[in-house]
Image: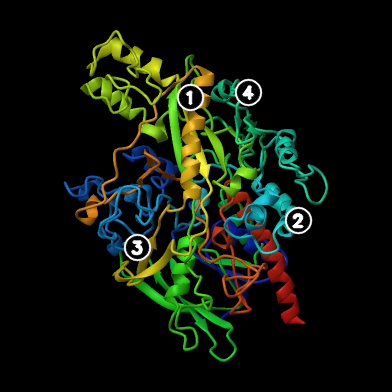
């Protein structure tokens, strides 16, 4: 048992936990943060070194714990993925998506696939495709920096379009969030174009000024857009379901001017890491919190149980386990005690902790779970990717990974029939889409055709795809000819990414495994994840058609590769990971890194975990923050909204601490 009673005990030091800690620390409140992961480094040179040496440049590759161990590579484990049963703080990684059925390589466990499924069966269980970090500063270590507000209609999806659920209070919740959006914009340091975003709000019938509208006040002008953006900006006269298609600069959490952080220098590896910290990460806010003198943090401290007073229903402590080495034994246990408690451990680890805390007499199903909703309604922005070659050079692979997008399709009457989406314009060539520059290099060195640039294939419009018809199919090049061919390809690569909203589905959920544990003996997450609604699948069909229209308008050649038929039989290892069939098409979906739902807010304690104050219905001194509180995933990247909600929660907790003190 800790000797000090804090005003607030927080689990997790990502953006939400750090914001709340800083706000309370400034007001003289004593705060303790329990962080499962390792310490924030003095500088990021060690992370950069790990990133440079990593074979796979994934979102997690720079950060501890290691995502790859070459010494452990075997024919059955070619990537050398560590065994999560031997790790004290394992987490899910992009590399594990393809090892999703292997419990000695994948942190998540999955339920068995139902027998007799076909490729278009909506009951198919998929691998979850988005990852997160468990280190000081949380997942902002690998976010892109996109800092978009949601629209008022995003908060009333059920009322407006008859789909999903409303946020508590609907559009009035947005009105209350507006001043907190301003605080979040300033804390992150967003560079953006007010005029461009006002145009979008006007299109969606939201007054650009006043309490109902955005009141944008960006601290900095927008980041300079790329040549790729300029080419897409020439696309005009396209209308999608009644909405005109046009691009706008994307508000970003990176400095366009020098300030507390350095000015963006155009480094291309924004995911996973900005080498100069021009891009915001939560260590900025965390360090400010610690400097108040009122905030303590304990790293390598894993919360494993929430104690409840069975008489009052109040939280009376959070048990934890400590360790020194990620692969070593536990070094101690204890209990953190506070007046109030805040869970800020993201949308996978927070429900895992709540469900593990089933030792309380009157709460046998876990803490805060009288509704049975803890862990349910797991969502992501399921992504459709499309890629091609522009007719003229666009010089990708330079500058931030995305500086503009098509935001004009994020709302409209069509949302009664299909998901909305925003279209992100990629500035990293085919790195995400085809693992370039490596895939194309290997094709022309070894005579392969994985990129479709070195063979006889055609695209869905019937256009031939061989890049240089003067070369025979499956050419093997070397020397000057190889260099010239690759250079001519790389400078023309373009990519679109569609962030498709996913409806809340109570059967998409996080539970705890009854068979698999981590090295501390704690149960690992059991994840059930499907994309089974026609609502989302219709958006994939729309995205495919819109991509073709955009590429044709640009005079570009599309190289999007249709995936093979999903394999839905045989041993678990053979089951599809992220492929499905719909309306005669094969699709692959990708994760956006936007893990949402699992402990949502609501107006009714029967179908939600939290009230509109982000306070547990069951335990008045327990609060939760982060993307898990979202009732719907909406249409914009979630981080700015996560931050705004954290500021709002901080005010609510301060108000309640004042009440309790009185």
Say which of marks 3 and 1 sits in front: 1
Say which of marks 3 and 2 sits in front: 2
Query: Which percent across, then down, holds residue 15?
Result: 58, 55
Residue carrying label 2: 175
Residue carrying label 3: 325
Q: In the shown orientation, is residue 385 left or right of residue 518?
A: right
Q: In the shown orientation, is residue 382 left or right of residue 241?
A: left
**Tag 3 and tag 1, C-beta contact below 8 Å:** no
Query: Which percent across, then down, holds residue 127?
Result: 35, 53
Q: Element type at marker 4?
A: loop
Q: Is residue 361 above or below residue 606?
A: below
Which class describes the residues within 10 Å of circle 1: few (<14), some (14-19), or many (20+)?
Answer: many
Query: Which percent across, then down, holds residue 256?
Result: 65, 34
Which class describes the residues within 10 Å of circle 3: few (<14), some (14-19), or many (20+)?
Answer: few
Residue carrying label 1: 396
Q: Which mark is residue 237?
A: 4
Query: Which percent across, then down, holds residue 416?
Result: 60, 49
Q: Earlier in the sequence, mark 3 or mark 2?
A: 2
Which color scheme does this rendered protein use?
rainbow
Which residue is at the far right? 210
Say which of marks 4 and 1 sits in front: 4
Q: Is residue 5 above or below residue 418?
A: below
Say which of marks 4 and 3 sits in front: 4
């Amino acid at each position: 048992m800790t000797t000090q009673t804090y005003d607030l005990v927080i689990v997790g030091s990502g953006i939400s936990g750090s914001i709340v800690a800083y706000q309370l620390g400034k007001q003289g409140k004593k705060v303790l943060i329990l962080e499962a992961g390792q310490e924030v480094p003095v500088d990021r040179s060690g992370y950069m070194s790990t990133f440079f040496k990593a074979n796979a440049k994934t979102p997690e590759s720079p950060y501890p714990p290691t995502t790859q161990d070459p010494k452990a590579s075997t024919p059955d484990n070619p990537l050398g993925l560590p065994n999560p049963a031997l790790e004290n703080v394992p987490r899910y990684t992009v590399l594990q998506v393809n090892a999703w059925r292997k419990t000695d390589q994948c942190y998540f466990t999955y339920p068995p696939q139902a027998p007799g499924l076909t490729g278009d069966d909506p009951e198919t269980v998929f691998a979850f495709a988005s990852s997160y970090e468990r280190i000081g500063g949380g997942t902002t270590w690998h976010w892109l920096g996109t800092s978009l507000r949601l629209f008022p209609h995003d908060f009333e999806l059920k009322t407006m379009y008859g789909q999903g659920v409303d946020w508590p209070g609907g559009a009035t919740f947005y009105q209350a969030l507006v001043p907190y959006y301003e605080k979040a914009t300033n804390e992150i340091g967003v560079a953006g174009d007010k005029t461009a975003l006002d145009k979008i709000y006007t299109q969606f019938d939201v007054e650009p000024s006043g309490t109902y509208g955005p009141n944008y006040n960006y601290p900095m002008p927008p980041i300079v857009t790329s040549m790729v953006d300029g080419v897409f900006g020439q696309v005009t006269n396209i209308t999608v379901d009644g909405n005109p298609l046009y691009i706008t600069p994307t508000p970003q959490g990176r400095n366009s001017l020098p300030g507390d952080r350095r000015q963006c220098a155009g480094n291309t590896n924004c995911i996973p890491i900005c080498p100069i910290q021009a891009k915001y990460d939560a260590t900025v806010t965390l360090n400010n919190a610690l400097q108040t003198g009122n905030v303590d943090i304990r790293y390598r401290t894993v919360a494993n149980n929430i104690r409840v007073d069975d008489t009052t229903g109040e939280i009376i402590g959070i048990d934890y386990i400590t360790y020194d080495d990620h692969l070593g034994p536990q070094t101690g246990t204890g209990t953190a005690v506070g007046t109030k408690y805040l869970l800020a451990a993201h949308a996978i680890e927070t429900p895992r902790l709540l469900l593990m805390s089933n030792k309380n007499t009157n709460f046998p199903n876990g803490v805060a779970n009288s509704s049975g909703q803890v862990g349910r309604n797991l969502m992501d922005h399921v992504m459709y990717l499309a890629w091609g070659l522009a007719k003229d050079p666009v010089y990708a692979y330079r500058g931030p990974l995305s500086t503009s997008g098509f935001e004009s399709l994020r709302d409209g009457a069509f949302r009664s029939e299909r998901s909305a989406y925003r279209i992100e314009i990629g500035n990293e060539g085919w790195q995400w889409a085809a693992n370039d520059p490596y895939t194309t290099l290997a094709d022309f060195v070894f005579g392969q055709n994985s990129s479709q640039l070195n063979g006889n294939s055609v695209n869905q419009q019937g256009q031939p795809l061989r890049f240089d018809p003067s070369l025979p199919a499956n050419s093997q090049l070397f020397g000057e000819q190889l260099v010239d061919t690759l250079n001519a390809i790389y400078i023309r690569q373009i990519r679109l990414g569609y962030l498709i909203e996913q409806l809340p589905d109570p059967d998409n959920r996080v539970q705890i495994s009854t068979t698999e544990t981590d090295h501390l003996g704690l149960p690992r997450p059991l994840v059930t994840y499907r994309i089974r609604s026609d609502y989302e699948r219709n958006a994939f069909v729309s995205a495919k058609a819109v991509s073709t229209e955009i590429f044709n308008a640009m005079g570009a050649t599309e190289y999007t590769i249709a995936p093979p038929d999903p394999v839905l039989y045989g041993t678990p290892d053979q089951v599809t990971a992220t492929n499905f069939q719909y309306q005669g098409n094969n699709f692959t979906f990708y994760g956006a890194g936007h893990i949402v739902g699992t402990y949502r807010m609501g107006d009714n304690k029967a179908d939600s975990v939290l009230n509109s104050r982000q306070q547990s219905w069951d335990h008045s001194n327990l609060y939760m923050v982060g993307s898990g509180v979202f009732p719907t995933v909406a249409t914009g990247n979630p981080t700015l909204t996560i931050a705004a909600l954290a500021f709002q929660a901080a005010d609510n907790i301060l108000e309640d601490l004042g009440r309790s003190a009185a």
